[in-house]
Image: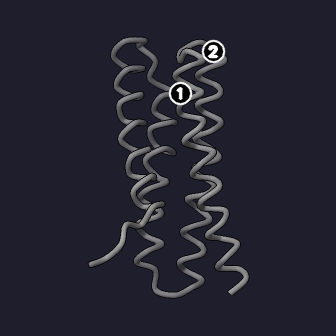
Amino acid sequence: MKSENIIQTKSYGFALRIIKVYKYLSQEKKEFILSKQLLRSGTSIGANIEESIGGQSKADFFAKLTIAYKETRESKYWIRLLRDSEYLTVDQAEDLLKDVEELLKIIGSIQKTVRNS
């Protein structure tokens, strides 16, 4: 039996949360530009994780992982901007930012392991 891939699971769960935030922002707050940017970057994290898992080589794996890391950083930016422009409450944003920090730590740790192997 295959064990759970924590980054795969967490990035997928984060993508689902981002989709819900996008729906909230577009339907309730009528905000379409910033929320679309967050939707793209937030769902791209998991997609790039999936691509890295299916990578053709160690270099391909690392490249896709690096893109996932960059998308996570970008998502952090959009969440902060949505918080500071008051489209998201501090509590909503902080909960998402906690997930972002966790993803950054996990992806960064994987990158370090790959670099050192």
Q: Residues within 10 Å of mark 1 (few under 14, many from 20)?
A: some
Instruction: Please give left or right for residue 56 compared with residue 108 in the image.
Output: left
Q: Position of residue 4 (x, y in %)?
A: 37, 66
Task: Return the residue at label 1.
Answer: 34
Position of 100 relative to 79 (above/below): below
With respect to residue 63, does 15 lie above or below? Answer: above
- Residue at 26% of width from left, 78% of height from top? 1
Coordinates of residue 34 in the picture (x, y in percent) = 53, 27
Identify whether 34 is placed above or below 77. above
Residue type highlighted by circle 1: Leu
Residue furthest left as drawn? 1
Residue ID at (59%, 72%)? 63
User: Which tag is nearer the camera, tag 2 or tag 1?
Assistant: 2
Q: Is residue 87 above or below residue 1?
A: above
CB-based contact (under 8 Å), mark 2 and mark 1: yes
Q: How is the image coloured?
A: one colour
Residue placed at 43% from the left, 12% from the top? 29
* Picture quarter with the C terminus: bottom right
Secondary structure at numbered mark 2: loop
Quick one: label 2, few (<14), some, or many (20+) residues within 10 Å? few
Measured in 3D between alpha carbons, the distance from the residue under mark 2 to the one under mark 1, in whole angstroms, is: 10 Å
The percent coordinates of residue 94 (x first, y second) are 59, 27
In which quadrant of the rendered view does residue 111 lie? bottom right
- Quarter of the figure with residue 109: bottom right
Q: Which residue is mark 2?
A: 85
